[in-house]
Structure formats: C-alpha cells, structure tokens
Amino acid sequence: MPEIEGVILVLHTLGFFAVLIPLVILAPKGSVQFVFQDFANQVGWSSNGLAWFVGIISTNLPFIGYDGPCHMAEEVQNASTGSVSSSTSMPRAVADSSFGLDFSRSTLSPTR
C-alpha cells in the first residue's frame, strides 16, 4: 500500500505542475489589482461582506463535512509532516484568479 500512495503522490505533484506551468505561460494575464484588490458583488446581495461570506461557504465544505482524509492520515506514518495539497493551494488560487478568467462573460453564459 505505501508504494501505491507514493505513486499517487508523484502523479498528483506532476499533474499539478503539468496544469500550472502551461497556464502561467500561455494564458492571458489579468492585472495584479484584479487578483488581490477588486471585489465584484454581481449577485445582488445587500452588502459586499454578505456576498463574500455566501461565496466562501463552498470552499469551507471540505473542512466541515469531508473528514475521510483525517481518518486516512491516522494510518499514514509521519502524517504531521504536511501535505502537497496544502503547499500548492495558494499558487493554484493565484493562478486561477490571474490567468484567462473573464468572470463578466461567464456570468452572462446561457448555461447559467
């Protein structure tokens, strides 16, 4: 079983960089202000704070309901040394916000 976990760890890490590197190199880039300062309340909530809290709910679901990884970590040796996913989440969030995302066009999509 540890061999399979090692293979999956390597595949996860390689897959992360296989997606992130072409995205950073090839995608159109947004401004730094858009990524770190702008906030658009396009859903009609009464305040920006309320819109932010409603939007953050879905990102908190893994912390409140999906506890399978916690139970799996009990079985892993040296589980307290950290994980690849936690170290790659911030670069992924910045890349997702910076490259190639036109939120105004996606909100006008007929599949909404």
Image (cartoon, grey):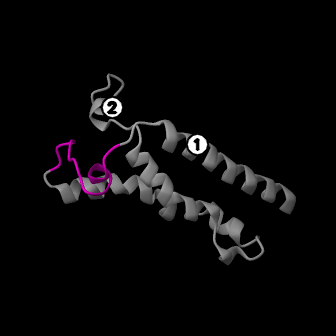
- 58 falls in the magenta region: no
**Can residue 1 be spotted in the picture?**
no
**Can residue 34 be spotted in the picture?**
yes
Q: Which mark is residue 60?
A: none
The image position of residue 84, as x and y in percent, is 63, 62
- Residue bounds of the magenta highlight: 30-45
Please name whichever residue, 66 or 79, is drawn nearer the observer in this view of the structure: 79
The image position of residue 110, as x and y in percent, is 32, 22
Q: Residue furthest toward the left?
A: 46
Q: Height in image: 78 above or below 1?
A: below
Q: Nearer the viewer, mark 1 or mark 2?
A: 1
On screen, residue 83 versus residue 111, left or right, reads right
Task: Please give the residue where the numbered disc 2 appears in the rendered image.
Answer: 106
Disc 2 marks a residue whose amino acid type is Ser
Give the spatial CA distance, label 1 vs label 2.
21 Å
Q: Secondary structure at mark 1?
A: helix
Q: Height in image: 16 above or below 85?
A: above
Quarter placement of the N terminus: bottom right
Task: Please give the residue where the numbered disc 1 appears in the rendered image.
Answer: 19
Please name whichever residue, 22 or 85, is drawn nearer the observer in this view of the structure: 22
The image position of residue 88, as x and y in percent, is 56, 59
Q: Secondary structure at mark 2?
A: helix
Q: Main secondary structure of the magenta part?
A: loop
**Tag 2 or tag 1, which sits nearer the N-term?**
1
Q: Residue at x 33, y 31 (%)?
A: 106
Q: Which quarter of the figure has residue 77?
A: bottom right
Tell me if mark 2 has few (under 14), some (14-19) or many (20+) residues whose alpha carbon lies within 10 angstroms of its own: few
